[in-house]
Image: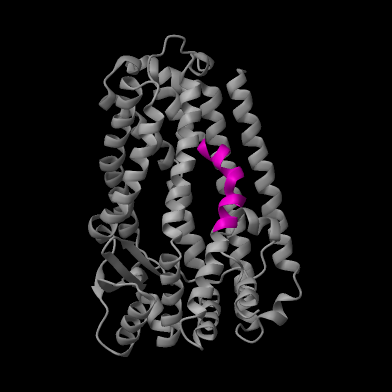
Amino acid sequence: MTLLNGVLLVLLLARVICETVLRKLNASYTQNNTKIAKQCGKFMDTRTLQRTIAYTLAKNQFALLHLYYEALLITCILFSGLIPWLLSQHNLLLSSTFKQSCTLFLWVTGFGLCFLPLDYFYQFSLEKSFGFNRSTKQLWISDQVKSIVINACIHIPIFALLFYCIQTFPHTWWILGTLGSFVLQITFMWLYPKLILPLFNKLTPLEDGSLKTKLDALAQKAGFKAAAIQVLDSSKRSLHANAYCSSLGRMQRIVLYDTLLKDFTDEEIEAILAHEIGHYKCKHILKMIAFSTFSTLVGLKACDTLLQNNWFNSQLGIPTATTSLPLLTLLCICAPLFTYWFHPINNYFSRRYEYEADMFAKKQSPTCALHLMQALKKLHKKNLSNLSPHPWFSAFHYSHPTLFEREQHLFR
């Protein structure tokens, strides 16, 4: 066993053990929390609460299955010698940047395809058993094919440009890569609603009426100049409900899930939208992009440090490698072993942003806070969201505060 494999194996085992403990704690805490029935008794009946607990436990078990399956795949990749063998078979170390980028995409895509059976099970067994799935097998297959094609069109040129920068600017490529990442995030925010989202969902303008009048007035009052208020046909895949605002320069959109319109009052939808506009007004999107850019900078600098000597490639049994392909391939597959430990930090800031957006919504009208809580309770009931996650599990996995944490903060 090489030192590299040893380090990765330790990280893998640590993640598996930590996640298993968290999942077990969460399952026990959810089942045995006797106070939760009293807290949610006014908006959720006993039967729905039991379904919520059952849904949480089912997702918990599925997550553990996914975790162990992923760990097994990564272990096989680490100790099978697959990466150096494939490189030696096709002489990829000396091939063009485009060929290397295609190879990297195929390897990462192939790794992702290994999880399709689990994704299929989740969609058509677990989600279906709780009444959420509305997708058909044909639509699911179509979504997978479209995703692969779109990812190929996006990632192959990006990978090729990255390989080119590494070869042409060996000492500054990580700075150029960070700048490129920032530009790509902004570009993607502009392209996604115009080119990518319509390939999967249909967006239609919200019909004229009292709701549209209220939302227009809210957006104008809050300083969000919405170019369009649109309805997303999310119900063809799932019954989960949501809404969001997207903004880039003058291109500001309000998107409502059609499932939201069916079960929520105008005042509740208005309160949800006020919360979403709060993210925009508090510049949370820009802060998240800045944090992502900084994280990219640190990550690419770490990669640059590894590329400055031949240690990494020699650990893989490639003593004369002249490309970063082995490093990038392994990092794309093993990235969760590193990023997992930063989840509590990311979630801490994300929850702060949610509190700030809630307080922004509260200031929009005297009754907005009340309607927001009514809407959140409906969302939790409709989505069978866990009302009592274990605090440690919440720190690692919840980007939003729990329902009762938000209620306490909103009405303190």
Q: Is residue 223 above or below residue 57?
A: below
The one nearer the camera, 182 or 93, is 182
Count of marks, rendered view: 0
Residue extending farthest top:
320
Q: Position of residue 174 (x, y in %)?
A: 41, 30
Compared across the picture, whether 299 is left or right of 208 comes to: right
Tell me which residue sits at (25%, 71%) in the image.
227
Task: Look at the image and say whether residue 190 sits in the magenta stretch.
Answer: no
The one nearer the camera, 339 or 38, is 339
Q: Position of residue 372 (x, y in %)?
A: 51, 80
Tell me which residue sits at (50%, 17%) in the image.
316
Tell me which residue sits at (62%, 29%) in the image.
9
Q: Position of residue 403 (x, y in %)?
A: 60, 73
Principal SS element in the magenta part? helix
Q: The C terminus is located in which quarter?
A: bottom right
Q: The N terminus is located in which quarter?
A: top right
Task: Look at the image and say whether residue 338 sits in the magenta stretch.
Answer: yes
Compared across the picture, whether 116 is left or right of 61 comes to: left
Q: Which residues are magenta?
A: 335-349
